[in-house]
Image (cartoon, coloured by chain):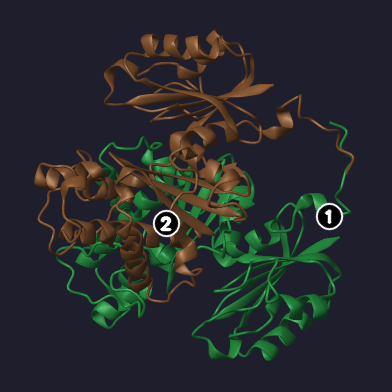
Chain colours: A brown, B green
């Protein structure tokens, strides 16, 4: 018996069929268009399988307050067609299975925690650095949601002394996403980061901002491990730049684990989101997996 | 039958006898001297009572990793006499009761959550702004500890454009504690904040720093409520200054609760620390309170 998983993103929906142990047996990537049209394609994909449960890691902001009337609804997003769309309700109605919903970044954190680079850690912060910046946190097997889901990508950072760029986030002056996202890198030069030379000062600046954020996250959450994923982190030299700057900025105040183990790449090879969605389905509610509590 | 509580601070130890419902029936305040001498006075106080259990909210840094060989030991502190002192071991040995240990700020957060200003909230961040700055976080009745206890008072903030002060924290340039603590206020002028006029620009600056930190904490932890306590917050006009600056800095990005309910003063009248220490003792392990699970 299989479970279903959806990584619901602003540009694409990844849908998969998988096992409770995280193996993916079928997978499809669908472009995100309008909600009804996208959902129809999702339903068509799952129609070929009988799934027990569905895990969904979604873009946001999305209402994750289970006591709310609008639980599972996409909130105030620039994607006008999706604003106010009851994603959870539509999935439950169309697929008639229990749905386990969380943010895309919480799902990715859980995927890496369960089956990826953070196996064995008690807590992990997963940061995605792509078009935007977001982060999800898992501690003792549970994803972290507060009054609402966190918006960690928007914490304030101090502008690099040599950076003349006006941050790209329309809400705040210099927030992390506004200065270190792929969008910010692109907007600095009018071309993609992938086309910039290795020694372009933008990498130093991007590492500077991410390191500042990581120091603050470390002081607030004290995670055992931090995983950096997303398109921008394909520039692998960023990892070492970031580690060095974290070390300098922390200045020995808080004891950190060995930095090569503390700040790492993901291990799930771009499947952390979809495998994480699968991981959102709690093993103990799967009636086909359930064993009596003999212990 | 009573429980015991200790608020172990760098300048004073508060010891109390209380009930599981948070009433304090006896209390003493002892100056913090060397560890052996201080502990002897603590033991003398508790000798007059038979206590079941003991809750301890301690200054730090302190090892709170239960799997560690040095669990309960004071770590690298400027208080040389206390460095490496096994506070938990000494208390267990001398008082022969189970000891529930956490940071002073986590205890205060729990006290306000259980019996103070955050009753009814699902999560609360308690920030103390005194000689130093620290914060404790409680969610769903449990205090938050990661790989180690957080050090939220040391997050980086951006210097106020009119502030010429060189931050007082020896580790970081401009961290929150280095710019907004009572020590920082004192060091700006060479005299205590209490002697400064109400319209001194330092209040505006202090609120500016605290608001920046609160925006970042809100984006990372999304607490339902934030309580600001400690000596500096006796300057009551700071609350409104901080609320206004949080509103400006967040700029509508994250929906916050009504600010007068989101950012509040403590309700336990300087007893949040000691009552919080009492609250660290879980009700369900008190054999004299335990009732069968009929529900």
The percent coordinates of residue A165 (x first, y second) are: 12, 51
When asked about the image quadrant of residue B287, the answer is bottom right
User: Does residue B155 appear in this view?
Assistant: yes
User: Does residue B230 appear in this view?
Assistant: no
Q: Residues within 10 Å of mark 1 (few under 14, many from 20)?
A: some
Q: Is residue A241 left or right of residue B232?
A: left
Q: Which residue is mark 1?
A: B286
- Distance between mark 1 and mark 2 Cα atoms: 36 Å
Residue at the (37%, 9%) spot, across then down: A37
Q: Which mark is residue A217?
A: 2
Q: Are marks 1 and 2 on the same chain?
A: no
Q: Which quadrant holds the C terminus of chain A? A: top right
Please say if B30 is above or below A212.
below
The percent coordinates of residue B122 (x first, y second) are: 57, 40
The percent coordinates of residue B44 (x first, y second) are: 78, 83
Please say if B153 is above or below A230.
below
The percent coordinates of residue B196 (x first, y second) are: 26, 72
């Amino acid at each position: 018996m299989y479970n279903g998983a959806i990584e619901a993103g602003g540009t694409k929906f990844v849908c998969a069929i998988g096992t409770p142990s995280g193996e993916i047996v079928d997978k499809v990537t669908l472009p995100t268009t309008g909600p009804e049209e996208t959902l129809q394609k999702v339903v068509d994909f799952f129609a070929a399988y009988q799934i027990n449960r569905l895990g969904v890691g979604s873009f946001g902001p999305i209402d994750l307050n289970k006591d709310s009337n609008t639980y599972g609804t996409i909130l105030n997003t620039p994607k006008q067609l999706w604003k106010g769309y009851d994603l959870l309700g539509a999935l439950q109605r169309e697929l008639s299975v229990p749905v386990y919903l969380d943010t895309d970044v919480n799902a990715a954190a859980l995927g890496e925690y369960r089956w990826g680079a953070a196996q064995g850690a008690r807590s992990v912060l997963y940061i995605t650095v792509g078009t935007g910046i977001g982060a999800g946190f898992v501690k003792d097997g549970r994803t972290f949601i507060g009054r609402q889901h966190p918006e960690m990508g928007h914490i304030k950072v101090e502008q690099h002394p040599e950076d003349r760029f006006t941050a790209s986030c329309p809400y705040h002056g210099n927030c992390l996403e506004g200065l270190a996202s792929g969008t910010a890198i692109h907007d600095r030069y009018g071309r993609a980061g992938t086309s910039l030379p290795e020694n372009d000062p933008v990498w130093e600046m991007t590492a500077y901002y991410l390191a500042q954020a990581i120091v603050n996250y470390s002081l607030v959450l004290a995670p055992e491990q931090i995983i950096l994923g997303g398109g921008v982190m394909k520039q692998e030299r960023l990892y070492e730049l970031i580690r060095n700057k974290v070390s300098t900025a922390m200045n020995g105040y808080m004891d950190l684990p060995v930095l090569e183990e503390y700040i790492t790449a993901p291990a799930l090879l771009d499947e952390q989101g979809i495998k994480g969605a699968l991981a959102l389905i709690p093993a103990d509610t799967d009636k086909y997996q359930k064993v009596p509590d003999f212990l």
